Image (cartoon, rainbow, N blue to C red):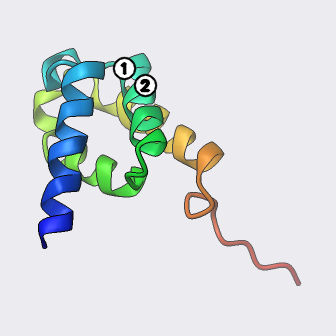
Amino acid sequence: MVQENAQQTKMEKIFQTTCGSFENCTESSIQSFLQQCEENGIDSQFCMSWVEQHKSEISDWQTVSKVSLEWMNQHTSTGSPISFSE
């Protein structure tokens, strides 16, 4: 539990540095945020679920969400869709 709180605090500091606030969160700042999280060993899925909790405060959520999903697909193995070949 303490580990999770430490990660949450570290992630929030990264968000402050890269985005500043949810209102200022853009497609470029969200990519910077995710990159910084990855460099600090914080799971990008964890970061994005936290950001998504505040999506009503992000003015262009559709674009930010799309860009973050694309970023995760390119940078994480968990982001890739499962495909079945016949």
- Residue type pointed to by label 2: Ser
Q: Are marks 2 and 1 in contact (CB under 8 Å)?
A: yes
Position of 69 relative to 19 (above/below):
below
Q: Position of residue 33 (x, y in %)?
A: 37, 30
Q: Position of residue 82 (x, y in %)?
A: 66, 72
Residue at mark 1:
29
Is residue 74 toward the left or the right of residue 63 in the image?
right
- Residue type pointed to by label 1: Ser
Residue drawn at x 48%, y 40% as measured from the top left: 39
Of 67 and 3, the residue lying toward us = 3
Which image quarter is the C terminus in?
bottom right
Q: Position of residue 48 (x, y in %)?
A: 32, 47
Is residue 67 toward the left or the right of residue 74 in the image?
left
Which image quarter is the N terminus in?
bottom left
The crowding category of the residue bearing disc 1, from other C-alpha atoms within 10 Å (few below 14, some 14 to 19, many at least 20), is some
Residue drawn at x 14%, y 19% as measured from the top left: 23
Position of 48 relative to 82 (above/below):
above
Is residue 69 toward the left or the right of residue 30 in the image?
right
Position of 8 relative to 14 (above/below):
below
In the structure shown, which secondary structural element does the residue marked by tag 2 occupy? helix
Of 46 and 36, the residue lying toward us = 36
Residue at mark 2:
32
Asked if residue 25 shows in the view, the reply is: no
Is residue 27 toward the left or the right of residue 74 in the image?
left
Asked if residue 18 shows in the view, the reply is: yes
Q: Position of residue 45 (x, y in %)?
A: 39, 56
Position of 32 relative to 68 (above/below):
above
Residue drawn at x 24%, y 42% as measured from the top left: 11
Of 10 and 21, the residue lying toward us = 10
So how many labels did they put on this image? 2
Of 65 and 17, the residue lying toward us = 17
In the structure shown, which secondary structural element does the residue marked by tag 1 occupy? helix
